[in-house]
Image: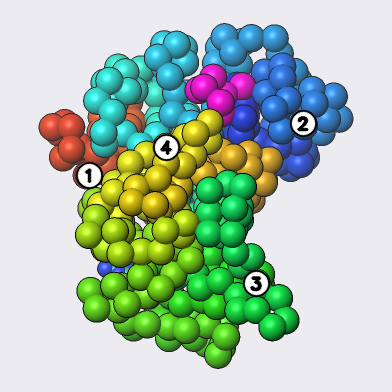
């Protein structure tokens, strides 16, 4: 199969669909990989590295889209990319279609088979192609929090880990899922006093087993949130209610009662944020201050560490890319109901229930759509 990797064109997107080591895996199986020139340049992967892995480097995105049977990307295709999609072609990338009618209409028109990373499922019930980005954001939340707690960056002027004879900072993590677990790991590693709140006791049990006594696990109630946020130096928001806006656990009134100079890193901002005073920010201007409390609400945190994020994403996507290339889309989708869950649009049909509902399209069962 001919697999194509265009350079991402969304502003400040440096990630790339396949790294050279993934290309090598595909080439070893007899596939041909076309990579647009400079596709990995932003994260230090040169055309020469791709060529050494067996890829053919081409000059334009048009060449990639014209020849590739399977296009592997990171972000949703923008309008100029959508124009180049064609019937029978497979697109494998993040799509986030539900809030994006224009894109959905174009993908339907294209006749292509569009598989969205974010709706691929796993046997354990998680979302395996979203989890790596939550891991990155969770780990990064503590790094960002520690930075903005420094006096020169507007913070309280405390060191997360303290020193012998001086207390460490108090870190409160709201939500103990993927983001929360990774935030906890880094905060404990830096020597902070760490409290995690979740309303699922199984999640708390799991964390308690994983980290032992240094971690304080708390059942999440209004009382507990108030008690811990008012004494926190750093609050990390990592809650998620699947398919819904994030619950506003930290009210504007509670922010008023937090320590001036403390920091909120609201990772859940991509779902609206779990703090009433949160609004999305970018890596260019990541923070703002409300009532003396620094708010860091970057909606695409992994974009700040695109090299790590690209490798993490590739580790998760490569098995699916190989399956699609080795077997062809029909057999790969037939054989794996978790990959089938990723099918959003196929030959003009919308094959994902939530996307169809959100945008008012007729929903066609994906298993039926691929048999047609
Ligand atoms: N900003 C970014 O760049 C970025 C990157 C990755 C993920 N995210 C977002 O981070 C959020 C968390 O993602 P995740 O993968 O960790 O989700 P997850 O499902 O693994 O974890 C969410 C946790 O929140 C808990 N929760 C729900 N309601 C709660 C409440 N009232 N009190 C306490 N805990 C509660 C759940 O029990 C669950 O354990 C999502 O909104 C995700 O989209 C943002």
Disc 3 element: loop
Q: Residues within 10 Å of mark 2 (few under 14, many from 20)?
A: some
Disc 2 element: loop
The answer to which of marks 2 and 3 sits earlier in the sequence is: 2
Nearer the observer, 365 or 221: 221
Q: Which mark is residue 161?
A: 3
Q: Which mark is residue 281?
A: 4
> Is 194 positioned to the left or the right of 257 in the image?
right
The answer to which of marks 4 and 2 sits earlier in the sequence is: 2
> Is 318 positioned to the left or the right of 96 in the image?
right
The answer to which of marks 1 and 4 sits earlier in the sequence is: 4
Q: Is residue 253 above or below residue 272?
A: below
The quarter of the rendered structure image containing the N terminus is top right
Q: Which mark is residue 45?
A: 2
Nearer the observer, 108 or 29: 108
Between circles 2 and 1, the one closer to the viewer is 2
> Is 36 positioned to the left or the right of 114 in the image?
right
Give the percent coordinates (x, y) of residue 289.
40, 45
Q: CA distance from mark 4 to mark 3?
A: 27 Å
The answer to which of marks 2 and 1 sits earlier in the sequence is: 2
Q: Which mark is residue 354?
A: 1
Q: Residues within 10 Å of mark 3 (few under 14, many from 20)?
A: some
Between circles 4 and 3, the one closer to the viewer is 3
Numbered range of the magenta stretch: 7-13
Nearer the observer, 260 or 18: 260
Between circles 1 and 4, the one closer to the viewer is 4
Disc 4 element: loop
Labels 2 and 1 touching (C-beta < 8 A): no
Q: CA distance from mark 4 to mark 2?
A: 28 Å
Give the percent coordinates (x, y) of residue 168.
60, 75
């Amino acid at each position: 199969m001919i697999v194509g990797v265009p350079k991402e064109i969304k502003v400040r997107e440096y990630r790339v669909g396949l790294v050279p080591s993934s290309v090598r895996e595909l080439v070893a199986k007899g596939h041909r990989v076309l990579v647009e020139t400079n596709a990995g340049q932003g994260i230090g992967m040169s055309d020469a590295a791709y060529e050494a892995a067996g890829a053919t480097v081409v000059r334009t995105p048009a060449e990639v889209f014209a020849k590739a049977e399977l296009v592997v990307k990171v972000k949703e295709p923008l309008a100029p990319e959508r124009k180049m999609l064609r019937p029978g072609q497979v697109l494998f990338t993040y799509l986030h279609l539900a809030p994006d009618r224009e894109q959905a209409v174009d993908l339907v028109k294209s006749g292509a088979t569009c598989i969205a990373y974010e709706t691929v499922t796993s046997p354990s019930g998680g979302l395996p192609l979203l989890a790596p980005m939550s891991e990155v954001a969770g780990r990064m939340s503590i790094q960002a929090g520690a930075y903005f707690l420094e006096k020169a960056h507007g913070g309280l002027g405390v060191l997360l880990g303290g020193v012998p004879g001086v207390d460490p900072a108090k870190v409160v993590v709201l939500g103990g899922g993927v983001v929360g677990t990774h935030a906890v790991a880094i905060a404990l590693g830096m020597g902070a006093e760490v409290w995690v709140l979740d309303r699922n006791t199984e999640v708390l049990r799991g964390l308690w087993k994983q980290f032992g006594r240094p971690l304080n696990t708390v059942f999440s109630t209004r009382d507990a949130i108030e008690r811990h946020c008012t004494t926190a130096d750093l609050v990390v928001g990592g809650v998620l209610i699947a398919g819904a806006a994030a619950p506003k656990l930290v009210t504007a009134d509670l922010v008023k009662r937090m320590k001036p100079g403390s920091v909120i890193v609201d990772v859940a901002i991509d779902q609206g944020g779990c703090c009433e005073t949160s609004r999305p920010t970018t890596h260019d201007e990541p923070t703002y201050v409300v009532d003396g409390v620094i708010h860091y609400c970057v909606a695409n945190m992994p974009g700040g560490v695109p090299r790590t994020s690209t490798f993490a994403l590739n580790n998760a996507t490569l098995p699916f890319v190989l399956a699609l290339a080795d077997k062809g889309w029909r057999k790969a989708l037939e054989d794996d109901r978790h990959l089938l869950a990723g099918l959003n649009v196929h030959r003009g049909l919308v094959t994902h229930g939530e996307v169809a509902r959100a945008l008012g399209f007729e929903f066609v069962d994906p298993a039926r759509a691929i048999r047609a």
